[in-house]
């Protein structure tokens, strides 16, 4: 049996060296910014994107490449393998899984393409893709790899708080009256990801209290295998510094990288959101 090849999309947060070493294929997202279409390639300038986004009257829109692009990719990979895992960001945030499944149909009976919804995004998706690609390099079968990923998905947790409510309103996660009242009261919704969907759970009145909520969430874990802070800037903010200092008190040996979230999350949450992605160790949650 030939080695399983792994395909994902550019919402996955992955080090370029890992992508190269593990032979991962990445399908770039198309970002509609004003009247322009930007492609989320490896050299995509997130800083320029956020500067442009700050002046938009309408939120950006993130879309996968068309079905034909996925067909060409699967066809090219099919010259060297008969098993492909196409693992993508949450189907509640983009149409990538749907497009991938459409593209896989012409290959039924020729070779096997498993399309999986990761039910997460960004660093969470990157964790899953890396694990899948490592298993593929070890020669594991497609069935074994899909079982591995299904077992990992429930151990990935995502929480955010947002500064402004207009993006949540536009995406239908808040009613207009809620958004208006929340803006008047300076409310910052605390959002979690459940089954791939971003869901407002609680409300706080200040960023300081919002950071408290994020810290409280993280502190509930007995052991963490991997964690990352997600924000819209490359440099640590005062909120990030405060969170890192508090985390060092309970997880002193845990590396906590800061990642800039991408256009797909930005189109859902807007600017100035702050969140964390936690991959819990198998020992679990307190």
Image: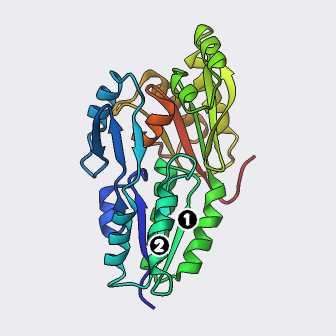
Badge 1: residue crowd in 10 Å (few <14, some 14–19, many ≥20): many
Badge 2: residue crowd in 10 Å (few <14, some 14–19, many ≥20): many
The N terminus appears in which quarter of the rendering?
Answer: bottom left
Q: How many labels, in total?
A: 2
Give percent across and percent down for residue 11.
42, 50
The furthest residue to the left: 43
Q: How far apart are marks 1 and 2 (CA)?
A: 12 Å
Q: At 63% from the left edge and 9% from the top edge, which residue is drawn?
A: 185
**Up/down of 176 relative to 283, above or below:** above
Q: At 49% from the left edge and 64% from the top edge, which residue is drawn?
A: 87
Q: At 61% from the left edge and 62% from the top edge, which residue is drawn?
A: 152
Give percent across and percent down for residue 269.
50, 32
In the picture, the disc for residue 104 is 2
Give percent across and percent down for residue 45.
26, 40
* Residue 221: quadrant of the picture: top right
**Up/down of 68 relative to 168, above or below:** below
In the picture, the disc for residue 116 is 1
Residue 258 visible in the picture: no
**Up/down of 161 relative to 258, above or below:** above
Q: Which of 44 and 154 is in front in this view?
A: 44
**Relative to 146, is 257 on the left or the right?**
left
The furthest residue to the bottom: 1
Q: Of the residues tagged 1 and 2, which is closer to the observer?
A: 2
Q: Earlier in the sequence, mark 1 or mark 2?
A: 2
Q: Tell me the SS state at disc 2.
A: helix
Q: Which of 142 and 133 is in front in this view?
A: 142
Give percent across and percent down for residue 242.
51, 25
**Relative to 222, is 64 on the left or the right?**
left
**Relative to 111, is 153 on the left or the right?**
right
């Amino acid at each position: 049996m030939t080695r399983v090849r792994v395909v994902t999309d550019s919402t996955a947060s992955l080090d370029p060296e890992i992508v190269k070493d593990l032979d991962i294929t990445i399908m770039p997202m198309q970002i509609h910014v004003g009247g322009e279409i930007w492609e989320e390639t490896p050299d995509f300038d997130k800083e320029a994107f956020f500067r442009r986004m700050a002046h938009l009257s309408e939120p950006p829109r993130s879309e996968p490449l068309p079905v034909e692009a996925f067909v060409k990719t699967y066809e090219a990979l099919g010259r060297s393998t008969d098993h492909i895992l196409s693992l993508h960001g949450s189907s509640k945030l983009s149409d990538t899984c749907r497009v991938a499944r459409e593209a896989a149909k012409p290959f039924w009976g020729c070779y096997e393409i498993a399309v999986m919804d990761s039910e997460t995004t960004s660093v969470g998706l990157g964790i899953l893709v890396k694990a899948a690609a490592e298993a593929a390099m070890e020669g594991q079968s497609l069935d074994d790899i899909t079982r591995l990923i299904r077992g990992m998905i429930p151990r990935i947790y995502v929480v955010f708080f947002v500064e402004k409510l207009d993006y949540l309103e536009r995406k239908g996660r808040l009613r207009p009256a809620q958004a208006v009242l929340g803006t008047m009261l300076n409310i910052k919704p605390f959002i979690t990801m459940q089954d791939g969907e971003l869901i407002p759970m609680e409300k706080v009145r200040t960023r300081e209290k919002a950071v408290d909520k994020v810290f409280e969430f993280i502190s509930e874990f007995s052991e963490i295998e991997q964690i990352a802070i997600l924000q819209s800037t490359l440099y640590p903010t005062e909120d990030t510094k405060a969170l890192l200092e508090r985390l060092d008190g309970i997880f002193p040996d845990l590396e906590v990288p800061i990642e800039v979230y991408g256009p797909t999350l930005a189109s859902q949450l807007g600017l100035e959101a702050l969140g964390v992605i936690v991959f819990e160790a198998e020992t679990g949650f307190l």
